[in-house]
Image (cartoon, rainbow, N blue to C red):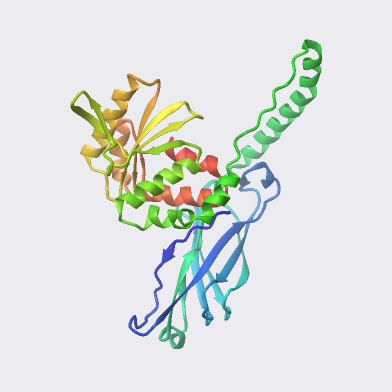
Amino acid sequence: MLMFATMMSLIVPHDASTATTGTLHVSLVSQPQPFSWLGFYDVLFPVDMTVIVYNPSAQTFPGGNLTGQISSPSGKWMSQRTYNLSEIPPREWKTLSLTFKPEESGVYTVKLDRLDLPLSSSMQQYWEVSGGFAAIQVEPPSTLFQVFTLIAIIAALLVIAPLLWRRTGVEGVQVRPSDLTPLLKAFNMFDAGKRMEKYLLEEKDDKKFESAVSWLLEILGFYAMKLDKIIRGESFREGETVVGSADILAYDSENDRVVVVDCTVGLPDAETLQGIANLAERLRSTVVKCDAIVVTSEKAEVRKRDAVNLGVIVVDRTDLELITGFVKSGRLDKARTRFE
């Protein structure tokens, strides 16, 4: 499970001139459901999570309430959660349990990102939360039966295939799917891995945002190249005429397509959407398949509706929150779908 630092504001009074600052790292780890080894969670069973609260600072956390909520995919169901934390010494942790019963299929978001300290403590010290977010994809019951059917078919093929190979004299080819786990572990040990989520969701520096998007694409299995405005590599020219520009050029081998990506820390305007759409259209005359993607750090539901008519994929802040949650839980296949 990847841990990225997401800094949340505390709603507690404090004197900024005298208060010292401490941080609690909160991690949410999903525990296996029955049959969750198949790679999904379903509505038939409760979802159990382990909450790990770690104090990495040299100061003792004085105790307080850790609060948050669980939200259903449709937004019709919400559950508030509060944990009373006792004192946590420096570099020590506490584990808590969180359980909820899914009422519908879809993506559930779990947040434990707020601290309330006693007044006597908050006047002397200001504490904040890092992390405390997870996204859980819950499938309908029918998925379970479909998977069992698929397993039965695969088992039958495994029995029949050796017999066919013996008759034809053809040896089976060993397939080794790409395993990104070592790369993710190594990436998370660098400052880039520790700061990627902050750059995606909090920073307003466009260069940091572009870098974080390119890192994310590589993590999800894209071959990504940051074109870089500083060295004047972002423009697409025909002769002396600039046809368009992009921040990142990437290849999606799973769908055999090239994608041109525009990154913005603000809301994309109509000119940005039209420009990246025109560039993708021009590249389609050269490559077999090309899609245009705009990634923004803001919520952009209205812009998404405009983008659909232009054939542009918009990935906004809501998508990025879900994507980072999927990456932390190792659900890279679910994260990739947000770019399709």
Where is residue 259 drawn, in percent x and y? 38, 32
Is residue 257 visible in the rendered image? The answer is: yes
Residue closer to the observer: 159 or 98: 159
Q: Is residue 155 left or right of residue 18?
A: right
Residue closer to the observer: 215 or 299: 215
Residue at 64 percent across and 55 percent down: it is: 46
Relative to residue 182, is residue 221 depicted above or below? Answer: above
Q: Is residue 153 left or right of residue 255?
A: right
Where residue 238 sits, quadrant-wise, is: top left
Quadrant of the drawing holding the N terminus: bottom right
Residue closer to the observer: 332 or 70: 332
Residue at 57 percent across and 47 percent down: it is: 330
List the single residue furthest toward the left: 240
Q: Is residue 100 left or right of residue 9?
A: right
Where is residue 209 drawn, in percent x and y? 35, 50
Residue at 33 percent across and 38 percent down: it is: 227
